[in-house]
Image: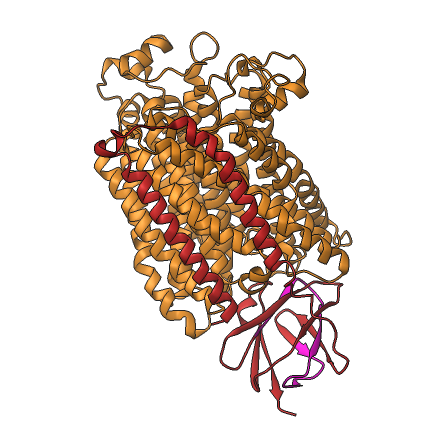
Chain colours: A red, B orange
Amino acid sequence: MNRLMLDYNVLYIVLVVAGLVFFGAIFLSTRPAQRAKPARVDAWMGREVAWFAIVIVILLGSLAATIGHTPWSASAAANRQVVTVTSLQYGFKFSTTTMHVDRQVEFHLKALDVNHGFAVYDPGGTFVAQAQMVPGYDTVLRLTFTKPGTYVVRCFEYCGIGHASMVGEFKVVRG
Amino acid sequence: MTVTTYEEARGLDVPKAAVGTVDIAKVRALTLRYLVVSTILLGAGGLLGILLRESQADLDRISPNLWYEVMTAHGLATFVGWAAFALMGVTWWVLAECGLPIQGWGWRFAVACFWTMTVGATGVVVTTLGMGFAGSWVFLYPLPFHGSWSMRATGIFALSILSVGLSIFAYCFGILAVVLGDGLGARSRSWGNRLGCALGFGYIWPGRFATEQPVPFPVLPLTVIAIDMIIATVPLAVLLVEMVVQSLFSGVTVNPVLAKSMLWWFGHPVVYLLLFPAVAIYYHLIPRYAKRPLVAGHIIGVGWLIGVCANVVIGAHHMYLDFPNTFQQTVNLGMQPLTYAVTIPSALSLYSLSFTIYRSDFEWTPAARFLAVGMVSWLVAGLQGVGLATIQYDALAHNTLWVVGHFHNMALLNIGLVVFAAAYAFVPQLTGRDWHSRRLADWHLVLTVVGGYGSVVPWMLQGLEGAPRRWAVLPQKYETLSQIALPFVLLIAIGQAIFFYNLARTIGWRSVRISLGSRVHSDDTVNPTERPSEALGAVLAGAGVALGLLCLTSKPLVWAPLGILAGYTATTLGTRRQGWWAVLAAAVLMLVGLAGFRVPS
């Protein structure tokens, strides 16, 4: 399992549990014993502005923490290896299928017919990265592999009835 | 019997708009017609969904061709044909109950919306299951022109979606015709000022956007979606026209990135075509059950102002993984904050709804229970949406089954529950009859929620492991979770079967008795269900003939029995003659199909 994806989902589960506690409290408050306590509707209405401010702050914080991490943000290394990948229903064609550990690979992704997806899995089957392959365009994806072995590539954009058979692979070797 | 006595006789709330301003019986019949037809589409789409899941779990594997045809039909049948269509119908009733009469152009658009959607849905069924179109329900250009299906199938499919687009236009213009009318009580005669009032500007600037009484809160999300969907649907309509032309003249093409942008310009706002009307229903029903007004101040107006602006431009967040040039990369970067912004109306709404319930004398009716669970799912699925709006996370989750889990969580377990809540709340008002069984309604909720989450969670776990979406046959490592999900899919199916039965017992049996000429109670004569039943019968008879015609393309032993069934059902709904003609047509066409005759494709 991809570590970053796992971290996101742990945070997500914490937030969901907090939400369930909140809704539990809201729904249980409609029991007769709870209803007997005074209801301050005007105060809750006023606090909506505070809630609005809290939401804005949370969203801005999330934005600041994540916006710099995009799949196109890796700058080109001087010693990078350039690999061209061409896709066509239902297969990938690599200019070379041998790459090197710790040496940046600059994939140039091209599609000849329809939209395809280029999704890379490491030798352990863990998802690594992906990008779309659009007809008529050259999409650049820069990755640095740290594990040697055979990497699997799967098509990640529905491309026709042979979509599930569109698989490729390449090797990453030391040195 | 007049409308007033009809309502009084049953102790129902009289919509403020009802008496003396509009023929409320017409709105009641039209709303019920939407609900019934969309429920039929839920049944059809749901069965297709079961087929997809059982095949992926390798219970009885179907061919990839059929799997992708079914995938295309399932998405459109459930998302648009059921959820959007039902919410469109309920919109008219909610507006009427808010004191806004559905008349004049509002009424004409409401009727046009129904028929154009029905035509579009029929076309989708014919082109996918009948003609083999399997370009997926997002029909990502240029795939529709690189498939194993014919150009004719692509052209008719595009025309069918165009009809759905026309339905959306009719819905939006219908809402605007209603909310810009006198029912809103705007003091200004200016259209611009009235539109501002309907958008809730009066909560922010009460002097400038003055109304006789506060604008009902359900009007805000409905006006927002009406404006946004008009803007969002225009480019899609242009793309569909291009596709029709290209299906006839192959030399006509369009840039794939431009086509993708046009699709997603529409493709995300259309999600809100479901969510915002659902919010309107929350705003309408939660205060009713809590017996207090919605706890919302001027800030909710600010929230919807942000919503109307952000919602219409965020479609490109579906293209985070398309970054072939710096322009597209810049657009993608802008999408993240804008998509975050569109969560603000949801965050404010959940706050308002929660504190409307808090310590209230809340009436836990079946509809109220559906709404309460729906609110929880709104948060659960909404948080997933914030994750997907984040480029860093979307780069990992995009096009995995995690996304499939997310939108089923939102569409079935939030919006779907609101559709059911609306049915449980409004069907008694639409028919004058109480629900056949409240206990069955409770079972419906339990089975849908347990089955729903039991079905969604395996998808999310598979997605976490990198399982790709839209794969007819998944790599073997994901198969166990596919199989674990199957019993839960069955629970959903049982839940919906209970709902169909309960609905039929509530609205249908009486109509059947009337159509068969048996003795009926005197007040049956005012039951508005007679009209939608006849309309439904006509639709089913037409569907029977259409299914019969599919025998001339392929699989006569599949289509003809379905056509005969549809025709026979029509005979029980007050359209005996049309129904029997449909049965006859389907039978004859089956024989023709079995004889080997095929329409050349």
**Location of residue B162 (image quadrant):** top right
Residue drawn at x 34%, y 34% as measured from the top left: B358
Q: Per the image, is A85 magenta? A: no
Residue drawn at x 65%, y 45% as measured from the top left: B265
User: B322 or B67, which lies in front?
Assistant: B322
Up/down of B72 relative to B463, above or below: above
Q: Per the image, is A111 magenta? A: yes
- Could you tell me residue B87's position as x and y percent? 46, 34
Up/down of B35 relative to B240, above or below: above
Placement of the N terminus of chain B among the 4 image quadrants:
top left
Q: Is residue B36 visible?
A: no
In this image, A54 relative to B291: left or right? right
User: B70 or B392, which lies in front?
Assistant: B392
User: A32 or B107, which lies in front?
Assistant: A32
Up/down of B467 relative to B509, above or below: below
Prevailing secondary structure of the magenta residues: strand
Q: Which residues are magenta?
A: A93-120
